[in-house]
Image: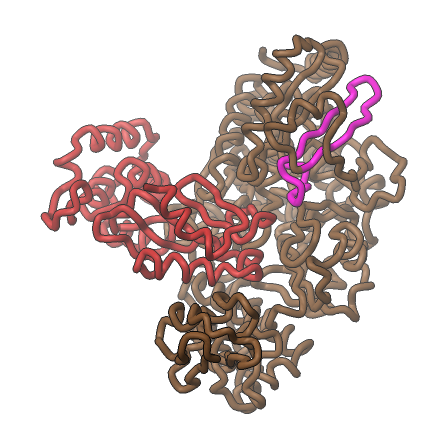
Amino acid sequence: MACSGCGCKERVNLLEVYPEKRRALDEYIDQLPLCEDMERQKGFLIGCLHKAQEIFGYLPLEVQECVGKRLRLQQSDIYGVISFYSFFTDQPVGKYKINVCTGTACFVRGADKILDGFKSALGLEDGQSSADLKFTLSTIRCVGACSLAPVVMVNDRVYGNVTPKMVSAIIKDCE
Amino acid sequence: MLITTPKQLSTLTRELQKQARKAAKTQVLVSMGTCGIAAGATPVFEALKRAVTARGLTDIDVLSVGCVGLCHSEPTVEIVDVATGSSTIYGAVTPEQAAALLDGQGREVKKSWYFPEDEANTENRMQARIVLRNSGRINPERMDDYIARDGYQALATALTGMKPEEVVDLITASGLRGRGGGGFPTGTKWRIAAAQPSKEKYLICNADEGDPGAFMDRAVLEGDPHAVLEAMVIAGYAIGASHGIIYVRAEYPLAIKRLQLAIGQARERGLIGENILGSGFAFDLSIKYGAGAFVCGEETALIRSIAGMRGMPTFKPPFPAVSGLWGKPTIVNNVETFANIPAILRKGAAWFKRIGTPGSPGTKVFCITGKIKKVGLIEVPMGITLRDIIFGLGEGIRNDRKFKAVQTGGPSGGCITEKHLETPIDYDTLKTLGSMMGSGGMIVMDEDDCMVDVAKFFVQFTMDESCGKCTPCRVGGRQMYRLLEKITEGNASLADLDTIRDLAQTIKTASLCGLGMTAPNPVLATLACFEDEYRAHVVDRKCPAGRCAKLITYTIDPELCTGCTLCARKCPTGCISGKVKDAHVIDQTTCIHCGACFDACRFSAVCKK
């Protein structure tokens, strides 16, 4: 996996670089009531992936393998789940995740123009991260703040009633 | 403190009610759901706390509560006189104005709901709150607040006074239908599961609210989590399940936090666990997280997701009530359905049936959003007309534009136009109108919305969210999207409209699950109501609402143009020419219809057609 720390293109193994993160993942798996019944064991997979993504920020191959070994699951099972659910990603994400809500309420109030504004301001397409891993631009399906539509979420912060003119100010807020 | 008998629970309830009356003369309730917080409720809450301390007021209690549904006026603060129960709600409160509320100064918001549980006087108020009875009235993080409002009394009644089959009979008699969208009778579902001989059964609460534009389940989980837990224990008892799972969207962090807290509290009090209230019945609960897949709202897909697999639906029958999670009988009910259960047990089936329509008793929570003046979360008796909702509760269309249509049922639903606004709505009437109840999102659209574009939006959504298992949905959805794209870009012919109708029928009939079977609905519904709009795109190459970029022509009015050159500088393709102080001209062959010139012009000289 590419280095996610300093932006260089070296392939690094997150488990080796961050032993404390690996320990945190191990500790989480240790406390699960793992069992012999493989079918039921699989029921822990999505929970483990949530935890792993929370710890590492994303799910590179070595982390997937680590989870697989502990749960005694095939790599194909794990990758199948990661690629199915939009919440999981095997690519590093930026420090600031700019999520433009494209739910129905935001759509009818012009979310497309907001998204276009971010695309041209950051030079990124939907789902891309900047090379320095500062920003990730993506769309999100309804954050449930429809009264404030159109809505943009940057990490946990919600901006409501966003206009195309506010785009640069929101980006500046991150810096 | 452990509660081991129903008597202990009643004593505690009475004590808490007495305490509440003694403790504070006035309650100040700050609505702090996700949207309240986004609108700035936290600094308001802190300002109110500071003001109360600074003035040395000991008889005022400032509480953080769940959503009251007044999204249009967030952040809201309700000031309640505890002795009389009368209250005033203030909206759009800022931290600076917060202290003045204590003196009764602020922007008042009209309350449009009553509680059929304890108020008979409706005073022409259109909303009836059963599901949202506690939301916005109690601190969802304090179990005592829930118990003081007769919480867990229904559980005590069920466990110690009723046989499991009597609980099933009561729910069947109430006529409660699944609030997740399909409207399947809840009692029937429970009866099937209860009749299974298996010793191991599962109960699942579907909190994977994926419909864009619907957030009622989140409001319930954030505002009244114990109601859902209480209902789940009751349902577990009725069908003979000893384990419940709440499958909740990972995108709802606050709801998850409050659920975890509530489960911990209920466990500590012994209302979840072994030998609940001394009845010998044991029930435990756990939370599983969704991971962003809309299809997991479908029950068989949800079950596979809990089992750690890709959330792909399976063929029914066997129905989950017969063979579900790990092959055991499993009931999947939606959050809102569960939130009705305690009230039905406390007040009886006859009481519940008096509310709503004969075919769909009770209430429904809707999220009204879009081009409406009063965006919000409402709970209305079934049978109310759309006109009452949109022009009564919603107070009509924003900026005095003309109403065009209302979309119900999200990506599975359809749209309803002016001529059907008087129809009393319930599960069956909406179906007759070619739409459906869905989870309860209601998006109001005005004359500036292009219905082809709206249909394309929903088809894109279901195309993205198709799990890919069956061909009609996976391939058909994509083809449908391409056809709609052709129309909005002005490249379609009238034959394409027939192809769309054909394709829609195939997708509806041949898809495996509800997602595919209902995916063409937004297209069929808009095509039925707004065929002229589709034809305008195809025949005249025009978008009447002016939304489809490729069909819009921008020109510059030489009379109005001052030659300021701003548009030419903003144009990304450099297709605008003209000298300073001379009228400018757009070269139509290189124009990409982006509208940058239209947005930039300060003299309204750029015309959009």
Residue occupying image coordinates x 27% and y 46%: A134
Q: How many marks?
A: 0
The colour scheme used to paint the residues is by chain
The N terminus of chain B, quarter of image: top right
Left or right? Give the position of A115 relative to B559.
left
Left or right? Give the position of B510 relative to B20.
left
Where is residue A129 drawn, in percent x and y? 28, 53
Residue occupying image coordinates x 72% and y 59%: B397
* Residue span colored magenta: B67-91
**Chain in red colour:** A
Where is residue B342 drawn, in percent x and y? 71, 33
Q: Is residue A144 visible?
A: yes
Left or right? Give the position of B71 relative to B110.
left
Residue occupying image coordinates x 63% and y 78%: B527
Q: Is residue B509 visible?
A: no
The colour applied to the residues of chain B in this rendering is brown
The C terminus of chain B, quarter of image: bottom right
Nearest the eye: B166 or A163: A163
Q: Say if the magenta span includes residue A66.
A: no
Q: Is residue B9 above or below residue B534?
A: above
Residue farthest along the left direction in this orientation: A10
Nearest the eye: B112 or B395: B395
Residue farthest along the front direction in this orientation: B581
Residue occupying image coordinates x 53% and y 23%: B273
Where is residue A100 drawn, in percent x and y? 44, 53
Where is residue B143 drawn, in percent x and y? 61, 21
